[in-house]
Image (cartoon, grey):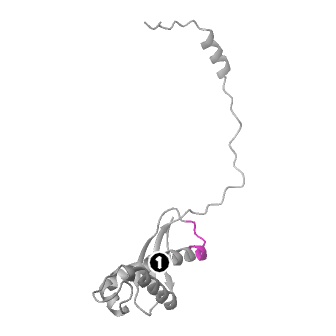
Amino acid sequence: MRSSRAVEVDADQVSRSIDQAYSRLAPRVRIAGFRPGKAPRPMVEREIGWPALRQEALDLILPTAYNSALDEAGLDPIDVPRVEVQQFDRGQPITGTPRVSSRSSVAPASSVDLGPAQTTHTGCRLSSVRSAETSWPSPG
């Protein structure tokens, strides 16, 4: 069963995820005249670029948002979701739609009538095959 549900992450969590993403990416940036991790944030962000910072922030926040949405909806996923992010800007909530396949909830039947049990007479046939004279070729 394919499911999709709109998910929104509030602006405070978005800001925290952007800060965490910056903290993870900033030490990798080398800017002339500054020690690693000591350059002013605007310079580092300009060097990193918004697309990389945005992707890192999404990687940090989406698993938590996705899991809470699953718990809220009571879904049991059977594959990895594909998330379509509709909006993600600084100071704004993230809105997106994860699409996932989940187990359908089918109630088991209370009783199933399979009819009378049928027996086969394989015992008689098996003993007749055993008693038959067979010759096996000798390895040779």
Left/right of residue 138 with respect to residue 30 in the rendered view: right
- On the image, the x and y values in percent for residue 60 come to 47, 78
- On the image, the x and y values in percent for residue 42 come to 35, 93
- On the image, the x and y values in percent for residue 3 come to 50, 70
Instruction: Please give the range of residues in magenta.
Output: 70-76
- Image position of 84 with respect to 123: above or below: below
Image quarter hosting the C terminus: top left
Outermost residue, left side:
32
Residue drawn at the location 63% of the way across and 17% of the way down:
126
For residue 76, which quarter of the picture?
bottom right
For residue 22, which quarter of the picture?
bottom left
- Image position of 46 with respect to 129: above or below: below
Residue drawn at the location 33% of the way across and 88% of the way down:
34
Q: Give whichever of 67, 102 is nearer the camera.
A: 67
Which residue position is annotated with label 1? Answer: 60
Left/right of residue 135 with respect to residue 37 in the rendered view: right
Three-letter code for the amino acid on which mark 1 is drawn = Leu
Element at label 1: helix
> Per the image, is 72 magenta?
yes
- On the image, the x and y values in percent for residue 138 come to 47, 6
Q: How many marks?
A: 1
Residue drawn at the location 41% of the way across and 78% of the way down:
56
Crowd tier of the residue under label 1, counting other residues whose Cα lies within 10 Å: few below 14, some 14–19, many 20 or above: some
Residue drawn at the location 71% of the way across and 37% of the way down:
116
